[in-house]
Image: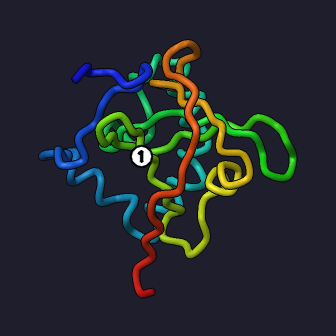
Amino acid sequence: MADLLNGIRRVDPNNGPTGLRRLIARIPTTWLGGGIHRVLFAPIDATLMRLTGGRCSSVFGIVPLVVLRTTGARSGATRAAPVGYFTDGDDVILIATNYGRADQPGWYYNLVTDPECELLADGVEGRGGRFIAHLTLIFQPGL
Protein backbone atom coordinates (compact mmCIF):
# COMPACT_ATOMS: atom_id res chain seq x y z
CA MET A 1 0.00 0.00 0.00
CA ALA A 2 1.46 3.38 -1.00
CA ASP A 3 2.04 6.07 1.62
CA LEU A 4 -0.13 8.50 -0.36
CA LEU A 5 -3.77 8.30 -1.40
CA ASN A 6 -4.41 10.62 -4.32
CA GLY A 7 -1.72 12.89 -2.85
CA ILE A 8 -3.08 12.69 0.71
CA ARG A 9 -0.86 11.15 3.40
CA ARG A 10 -2.35 7.93 4.77
CA VAL A 11 -3.17 8.16 8.48
CA ASP A 12 -3.86 5.16 10.72
CA PRO A 13 -6.53 6.19 13.29
CA ASN A 14 -5.06 3.70 15.77
CA ASN A 15 -1.77 5.63 16.00
CA GLY A 16 -2.56 8.42 18.44
CA PRO A 17 -0.39 11.31 19.62
CA THR A 18 2.16 10.71 22.35
CA GLY A 19 3.71 12.66 25.22
CA LEU A 20 3.53 16.44 24.96
CA ARG A 21 1.09 16.28 22.03
CA ARG A 22 -1.44 14.42 24.20
CA LEU A 23 -1.14 17.12 26.84
CA ILE A 24 -1.56 19.93 24.28
CA ALA A 25 -4.54 18.07 22.76
CA ARG A 26 -6.46 18.44 26.02
CA ILE A 27 -6.58 22.25 25.77
CA PRO A 28 -9.20 22.51 22.96
CA THR A 29 -11.38 19.94 24.73
CA THR A 30 -12.13 22.45 27.49
CA TRP A 31 -14.94 24.97 27.11
CA LEU A 32 -12.53 27.93 27.07
CA GLY A 33 -9.84 26.24 24.94
CA GLY A 34 -12.39 25.07 22.35
CA GLY A 35 -13.94 28.52 22.12
CA ILE A 36 -10.57 30.22 21.67
CA HIS A 37 -9.49 27.71 19.02
CA ARG A 38 -12.80 27.95 17.14
CA VAL A 39 -12.83 31.77 17.05
CA LEU A 40 -9.13 32.67 16.75
CA PHE A 41 -7.08 29.78 15.40
CA ALA A 42 -9.26 27.55 13.19
CA PRO A 43 -10.17 30.36 10.75
CA ILE A 44 -6.51 30.95 9.86
CA ASP A 45 -5.48 27.28 9.50
CA ALA A 46 -6.07 26.98 5.73
CA THR A 47 -3.93 30.06 5.04
CA LEU A 48 -1.28 29.06 7.57
CA MET A 49 -1.00 25.57 6.07
CA ARG A 50 -0.72 26.96 2.54
CA LEU A 51 1.94 29.51 3.48
CA THR A 52 4.08 26.97 5.38
CA GLY A 53 3.60 24.04 3.01
CA GLY A 54 1.68 22.18 5.70
CA ARG A 55 4.46 22.43 8.27
CA CYS A 56 2.39 24.56 10.64
CA SER A 57 -1.22 24.60 11.83
CA SER A 58 -3.00 25.54 15.02
CA VAL A 59 -3.30 21.89 16.06
CA PHE A 60 0.48 21.41 16.14
CA GLY A 61 0.37 18.11 14.25
CA ILE A 62 -1.84 16.45 16.87
CA VAL A 63 -4.64 15.95 14.36
CA PRO A 64 -3.74 15.36 10.70
CA LEU A 65 -5.38 18.07 8.58
CA VAL A 66 -6.29 18.52 4.93
CA VAL A 67 -7.90 21.58 3.41
CA LEU A 68 -11.33 20.69 2.08
CA ARG A 69 -12.66 22.72 -0.84
CA THR A 70 -16.41 22.61 -1.33
CA THR A 71 -19.09 24.58 -3.11
CA GLY A 72 -21.25 26.60 -0.70
CA ALA A 73 -24.70 25.04 -0.29
CA ARG A 74 -26.48 28.40 -0.42
CA SER A 75 -23.96 30.76 -1.99
CA GLY A 76 -22.45 28.52 -4.67
CA ALA A 77 -19.06 30.08 -3.82
CA THR A 78 -15.92 28.01 -3.31
CA ARG A 79 -15.25 27.41 0.37
CA ALA A 80 -12.08 26.11 2.05
CA ALA A 81 -11.87 24.60 5.52
CA PRO A 82 -9.13 22.69 7.33
CA VAL A 83 -10.54 19.34 8.40
CA GLY A 84 -9.18 16.51 10.53
CA TYR A 85 -9.05 13.17 8.77
CA PHE A 86 -7.77 9.60 8.74
CA THR A 87 -7.68 6.94 6.05
CA ASP A 88 -9.26 3.52 5.77
CA GLY A 89 -7.93 1.56 2.83
CA ASP A 90 -8.51 3.77 -0.20
CA ASP A 91 -10.97 6.07 1.59
CA VAL A 92 -10.29 9.42 3.25
CA ILE A 93 -12.54 9.80 6.29
CA LEU A 94 -13.25 13.42 7.25
CA ILE A 95 -14.05 14.16 10.89
CA ALA A 96 -17.21 16.28 10.99
CA THR A 97 -17.03 17.72 14.47
CA ASN A 98 -18.23 21.16 15.47
CA TYR A 99 -16.55 21.64 18.86
CA GLY A 100 -19.15 19.54 20.65
CA ARG A 101 -22.13 21.49 19.36
CA ALA A 102 -25.28 19.68 18.25
CA ASP A 103 -25.13 20.99 14.66
CA GLN A 104 -22.69 19.88 11.98
CA PRO A 105 -19.92 22.14 10.61
CA GLY A 106 -20.83 24.26 7.58
CA TRP A 107 -18.71 22.20 5.19
CA TYR A 108 -20.83 19.12 6.05
CA TYR A 109 -23.95 20.81 4.63
CA ASN A 110 -21.96 21.90 1.57
CA LEU A 111 -21.06 18.25 0.88
CA VAL A 112 -24.63 17.07 1.41
CA THR A 113 -25.74 19.55 -1.28
CA ASP A 114 -22.80 18.90 -3.65
CA PRO A 115 -20.61 15.89 -2.77
CA GLU A 116 -17.89 16.74 -5.30
CA CYS A 117 -14.94 18.20 -3.42
CA GLU A 118 -11.20 18.65 -3.42
CA LEU A 119 -8.77 17.79 -0.66
CA LEU A 120 -5.50 19.69 -0.56
CA ALA A 121 -2.67 17.88 1.20
CA ASP A 122 -0.94 20.32 3.55
CA GLY A 123 -3.27 23.01 2.16
CA VAL A 124 -1.03 23.33 -0.90
CA GLU A 125 -2.37 23.74 -4.43
CA GLY A 126 -1.41 20.78 -6.64
CA ARG A 127 -1.05 18.34 -3.71
CA GLY A 128 -4.17 16.28 -3.22
CA GLY A 129 -7.05 15.39 -5.44
CA ARG A 130 -10.74 15.39 -6.25
CA PHE A 131 -13.16 13.19 -4.32
CA ILE A 132 -16.86 12.36 -4.06
CA ALA A 133 -18.16 12.49 -0.48
CA HIS A 134 -20.39 9.78 0.98
CA LEU A 135 -22.07 9.93 4.38
CA THR A 136 -20.85 6.99 6.45
CA LEU A 137 -21.82 7.53 10.08
CA ILE A 138 -23.23 10.16 12.36
CA PHE A 139 -22.41 9.65 16.01
CA GLN A 140 -24.02 11.95 18.51
CA PRO A 141 -23.49 11.08 22.18
CA GLY A 142 -26.66 10.82 24.20
CA LEU A 143 -28.92 9.82 21.30
Write the residue at 53% across / 23% down: 129
Amino acid type at image mark 1:
Ile
Write the residue at 75% across / 40% down: 71
Residue closer to the observer: 2 or 71 = 2
> Residue 139 at x, y = what percent?
43, 71
Residue closer to the observer: 93 or 19 = 93
Q: Quadrant of the N terminus?
A: top left
Residue for badge 1? 93
Compared with residue 56, is residue 96 higher up or lower down, i.e. above or below?
below
Compared with residue 89, is residue 130 higher up or lower down, i.e. above or below?
above
**Res 7 quadrant in image:** top left
Left or right: 81 with respect to 127? right
Write the residue at 54% across / 30% down: 119
Residue closer to the observer: 46 or 2 = 2
> Residue 39 at x, y = what percent?
60, 54
**Res 60 quadrant in image:** top left
